[in-house]
Image (cartoon, grey):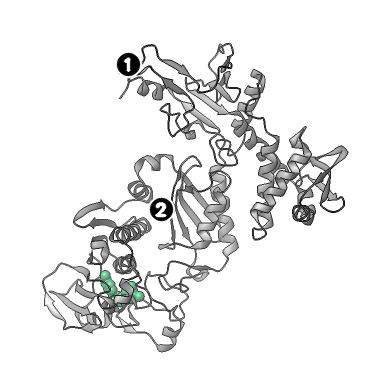
Amino acid sequence: MPIRRLAPETVNRIAAGEVIERPAAAVKELVENALDAGARRIAVAIAGGGIARIEVTDDGNGIPEIELALAIERHATSKLADEALIRIATLGFRGEALPSIGAAARLTLISRPRGQDVAARITVAGGAVGEVAPVAAPFGTRAIVEDLFYATPARRKFLRSTAAETAACVEAVRHLALAAPEVAFALSIDGVVSFDLPAQDRRARVAALYGRGEMDALLPIQAVREGVALSGFIGPASLTRATARHQNFVVNGRPVRDPLLRMALRIAYREVIPQGRHPVAALWLDLGHDRLDVNVHPAKAELRFAEPDGVRSLVIGAIQRALAAPADLAQAPALRLAPRGPAPSWSYAAAPAQQAHGFAEAEIGFGLDLKPVMRRQELPEEPSEYPLGAPIGQILDTYILALAGDGSLVLVDQHAAHERLTEERLRAERDAGGIARQGLLAPVPVDLPADDAARLLGSASALAELGLDIEGFGPGAVLIRAIPAALGPADPAGLLRDIADTMAESGEATALSARLDAVLARMACHRSIRAGRRLEIAEMAALLRQMEATPRAQTCPHGRPTVLKLTRGDLERMFGRAG
Ligand code: ADP
Ligand code: MG
């Protein structure tokens, strides 16, 4: 389709706004143009944070010489067949990017469509358009942006450091490369190749961009509901990052940073990863173009879904199902014996003179006083066939030590593990229609700050659904009549105070269902086997068997691991027996 000017009515319907706020935005627009042109290979070169120079070269359709001048005119596009803006299949559609870049920088387009003998070149600098001139170049298009924002100094002031702008450019290219794995992508930064990827399938592209080591741990996701298809890869709960950098969404081929999708990811992982950590995910959503409004954000980074609730629950549900696979030894993080951080779980103390030789007369202690640190059981006669193995002892009255059939040593944090088991039981009961309660023989009155009491009583009916029956008992007091049966013998007053704190902390702004989830987790924590309690071998075995049968058992409700393993391979590596 030739480039043409959009009708004024269409222009008015287009989400207006500045497209080019920083170099990464220019990079994104230029690469999107290359993708829209059907390129099979795209090369991006960035220098000086993208402020000095951006160059995007593609082997796509090219722009006919007679259309070059129109390409840099505002609201001229070859893409918008549907002026109702409903079925938009291309990444671009507004005809705004090139003129915006040309107004702020020096933009050169060199293009040669198939069938055209020579390429043609046009330059626009600070909005001043030059002549079209012939030039030798291969098929495809090269866009060169120099001195970005030289013509708009006010904008330049808002730029961050060159390093930060470079990083943003790299993120933009990575995200686009993920969105189009079937296109070969190369990126170079200040003359150094950052990556150079052939056409790949999704899995290989994710591996190339996220790191092969991570990729091996990722869980595939696949779900379809009501015409919306979700696929991709997510990290297990044990694999988290300090930032959201390894979270990418692609909707109908568009790389997006949509708040709804980010929030769905957060909710799906909320209870299995520690606060402040970020899950890893590369997710693709595909749905009918008419069920998606891409015309809501000038940089097209956000979308509007026709059925946002359906999309949200599809994403959350699919992720939670993938994470809920029963405890899998392969997913337990490898045990590391090297002390990390200031508080090693064991210490190795050698006299200074002997440190050079290492072990002579070294003492190995557990960094705690000398109470019995390990209780040993008889070794099992038969290798255990269970993934988490047979218990062989308890360390520090806190960790269960087990031996798996393949010789792996397994360590389980008894409190964290039990907390998860209780939580899952409460959750299953709730989902099956109601949490079983036990009435207290003598109802327990609890004094509380007035606002806490009011908050609890205001949610009394919701709490009753969680198996907690309370009623008012004069000003600032609450009477507990029943608690969830799964909690066994518990301290009801302490439980209620904890719940009051939880509800205060999650705040009025949090949806009730989220606050009740937090309450449920709090209940589970309350009941669970404390660290420091001595366990019988049968109790340990029961805990391990329950873990194997329970979803999400590899982490506690706060996201800490419940189980660590040390495989034969780990031992061999640590003892230098294997490379
Ligand atoms: P839009 O992408 O919204 O149409 P742009 O300003 O980004 O607007 O581009 C204007 C027009 O220039 C496009 O519609 C397209 O016809 C043409 N164009 C831009 N970049 C390329 C490219 N790399 N290959 C082929 N055509 C291009
Ligand atoms: Mg465009």
Q: Is residue 40 left or right of residue 466?
A: left
| Quadrant of residue 151 within the rendered picture | bottom left
The CB of the residue at mark 2 lies under 8 Å from ligand 2: no
Q: Is residue 68 left or right of residue 13?
A: left
**Mark 2 is on which residue type?**
Arg
Location of the C terminus by quadrant is top left
Q: Is residue 106 left or right of residue 387?
A: left
**In this rendering, which labeled residue sits more in front, label 1 or label 2?**
1
Judged from the image, the quadrant occupied by ligand 1 is: bottom left
Name the spot of residue 308 as percent of width and height, x first.
57, 64
- The CA distance from mark 1 to mark 2 is 47 Å
Q: Is residue 446 left or right of residue 401?
A: right
**550 lies above or below 241:** above
Q: Decide which of 397, 298 is in the foreground and name it.
A: 397
Name the residue at the bottom extreme: 8
Residue 350 can be seen, yes or no: yes
Q: Decide which of 53, 291 is in the foreground and name it.
A: 53
Name the spot of residue 174 as percent of width and height, x first.
34, 56
Give the labeled residue for mark 2: 245
Say whether disc 1 or disc 2 marks the residue closer to the N-terminus.
2
Name the spot of residue 402 as percent of width and height, x first.
55, 21
**Mark 1 is on which residue type?**
Ala
| Quadrant of residue 528 within the rendered picture | top right
Mark 1 and mark 2 residues within 8 Å of each other at the beta carbon: no
**67 lies above or below 559:** below
Element carrying mark 1 = helix
Give the labeled residue for mark 1: 353
| Residue occupying the point 55% across, 12% down | 379
Residue 224 can be seen, yes or no: no
Q: Decide which of 288, 560 is in the foreground and name it.
A: 560
